[in-house]
Amino acid sequence: MKTVQSCKGAIIRHESELALQFRELLPEDPDLHWHLLPGIGQPQLDHVELELDSQRIPFRPLYELKPSLSWLENLKVSTASPRPLVVTPELSPRIVAACKELGIAALDLNGRAWLRAPGLLVDRRPLPGRAFSYELEPRNIFAGKSARIVRCLLTDRSPLDAG
């Protein structure tokens, strides 16, 4: 009998979806032992702790759908606790390299992890069976400047019918 392994994956379009998936996947991490310390009713105020060798290292998740190099450079990394943890649907090699250079911890929903803190260094590839990605929502052609063109094309049909 053939068994099929379920694939965890989805297209993430909003930061709220990213935060929800992150909180759901933390307890399922096969290698790292995470503890979620929820904020008061707001996922943006959550803190997580990584338990390693009987020590807990606190992180403050920063949810970003598509982190850019300029966004990463503006993050303030201090020695104070909790340290920032960039959480994104999918980490690109370029963003991981920037995180390494800046000393910023990062984690994606696919299991890719670059965690750096005093006494801690974790560099893990994506986990098998996960396929999360970010997809920009299609532009609404009936809103904003593009709506003018659509209205123009839809309102005066007589020149097309005369032919």
Image (tube, rainbow, N blue to C red):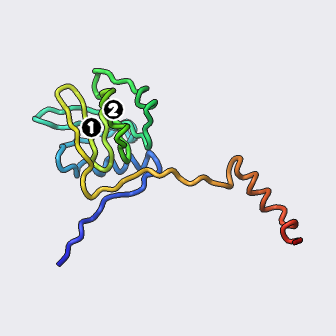
Q: What element carries label 1?
A: strand
Give the answer, above or below, for where 123 lies relative to 130.
above
Residue 131, x across and y down, in percent: 34, 56
Residue 74, x across and y down, in percent: 43, 26
Q: Which amino acid does label 1 sit on?
A: Trp
Identify the residue at horizontal 32%, vertical 30% (top origin). 104
Identify the residue at horizontal 41%, vertical 31% (top origin). 72
Q: In which quarter of the image is residue 80?
A: top left
Residue 5, x across and y down, in percent: 24, 66
The one of 158 and 54 positioned closer to us in this rendering? 158
Give the answer, above or below, for where 115 lies relative to 134.
above
Direction top: furthest residue:
79
Q: Name the residue under label 1.
A: 114
Q: In which quarter of the image is the N terminus?
A: bottom left
Direction left: furthest residue:
53
Q: In this view, does 2 lie to the left or right of 158?
A: left
Direction right: furthest residue:
162
Q: Which amino acid does label 2 sit on?
A: Cys
Residue 100, x across and y down, in percent: 30, 31
Q: How far apart are marks 1 and 2 (CA)?
A: 8 Å
Q: In this view, does 2 lie to the left or right of 141?
A: left
Q: Residues within 10 Å of mark 2 (few under 14, many from 20)?
A: many
The one of 28 and 6 positioned closer to us in this rendering? 6
Q: Is mark 2 on a helix, strand or loop?
A: helix
* First reached walking from the N terminus: tag 1 or tag 2: 2
Residue 140: numbered disc = none
Q: Mark 2 points at which residue?
A: 99
Proximity of marks 1 and 2: CB atoms separated by less than 8 Å: yes
Identify the residue at horizontal 23%, vertical 43% (top origin). 124
Q: In which quarter of the image is the C terminus?
A: bottom right
Q: In which quarter of the image is residue 112?
A: top left
The one of 57 and 115 positioned closer to us in this rendering? 115
